[in-house]
Image: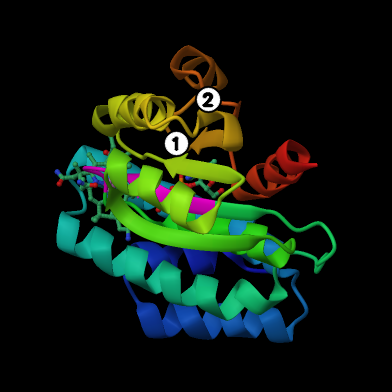
Amino acid sequence: MADYNAIQDALVSCDKERLISLVKGEIEANTPAPEILNKGLIPGMDIVGEKMENGDMFIPEVLMAAQSMGECVEILKPLLGEEDMASGGNVIIGTVKGDLHDIGKNLVAMMMESAGMTVHNLGVDIAPDQFVSQIKEKNAQVVCLSALLTTTMPMMKQTVDAIVEAGVRDQVKIMVGGAPVTQAFSDEIGADGFAPDAGSASRLAKELVS
Ligand code: B1M
């Protein structure tokens, strides 16, 4: 029986060595990688978020937890998602300007890669004109915008507007996601789709390019 509480405890207490050893132990015990992620690491990060909100954890600790989670995601990466190289798709993804959160965005990128798409991960704090130039340079079919802060959601609208103004709106599908983002917000800003998590983002991107 997988011990997801132990994984969550190790993540919340920033005990990276223990966390990595627990994750590796679950892999050896044949616990499916998506379960380790979805039942252990992601709920653990939600606890970190609550503690951050309540003032029980501070930025340096949250950063340590995030780095530990990132290392675990790298360990799980080869075991996540199915290879389906035939489906293709050329995607660019980035976190919008002003926002430095990248764990969820990297998970989305990873799921899309493992579903056979070519993913150009631009990183964090990406300005609207950078998205526009990358759409042109990479001849992207889909652009994915991530935002984790309510204060950076308006930057998604500014990015959509910049894509329209640059005259490339017709050649690219725009997807949005991140914890505060909703389908209603996606509709409001003129995006083509919203995905609540990495798995559905990957499926939606495939649908949009098919
Ligand atoms: Co920040 N932070 N943070 N933080 N942080 C949140 C988001 C917050 C909710 C915490 C809280 O107060 N409860 C809060 C936002 C409040 C709000 O806006 N309503 C917050 C705040 C306030 C801040 C700062 C302002 C704090 C400060 O400085 N006072 C600051 C802002 C910095 C900045 O960006 N300019 C800040 C900083 C940081 C750290 C740097 C310390 C660190 C980020 C490290 C990193 O990413 N490398 C951090 C972290 C780790 C968090 C929490 C704890 C965890 C985020 C995370 O990685 N979740 C977060 C609380 C929380 O979310 N529970 C919080 C796990 C990840 C797998 O989920 O990112 O939601 P998520 O991604 C999901 C989906 O949303 C979706 O798929 C992913 C996988 O299933 N998805 C997409 C994401 N992007 C997508 C794109 C798509 C589709 C789906 O494209 C189509």
Residue 28 drawn at (x, y percent): 71, 86
The amino acid at mark 1 is: Ala
* Snapshot quadrant of residue 17: bottom left
Say if disc 1 is inside 8 Å of ligand 1.
yes
Report the coloring of the rendering: rainbow
Residue 209 drawn at (x, y percent): 73, 42
**The magenta segment:** 92-99
Q: In which quarter of the image is the C terminus?
A: top right
Residue at numbered disc 2:
191
Residue at numbered disc 1:
179
**How far is disc 1 from disc 2 in space, using C-alphas?**
16 Å
Q: Compared to 100, does 41 lie above or below?
A: below
Q: Which residue is drawn at 70% across and 66% down?
A: 114
Asked whether 135 or 38 is in front, the reply is 135
Residue 11 drawn at (x, y percent): 40, 66
Q: Compared to 175, does 56 lie above or below?
A: below
The amino acid at mark 2 is: Ala
**Is residue 189 found inside the magenta-colored segment of the image?**
no
If you read the primary sequence from the N terminus, does the residue marked by circle 1 or circle 2 appear first?
1
Query: Element at badge 1?
Result: loop
Do labels 1 and 2 touch, CB within 8 Å?
A: no
Q: Residue at x 30, y 24 (%)?
A: 154
**Is residue 93 found inside the magenta-colored segment of the image?**
yes
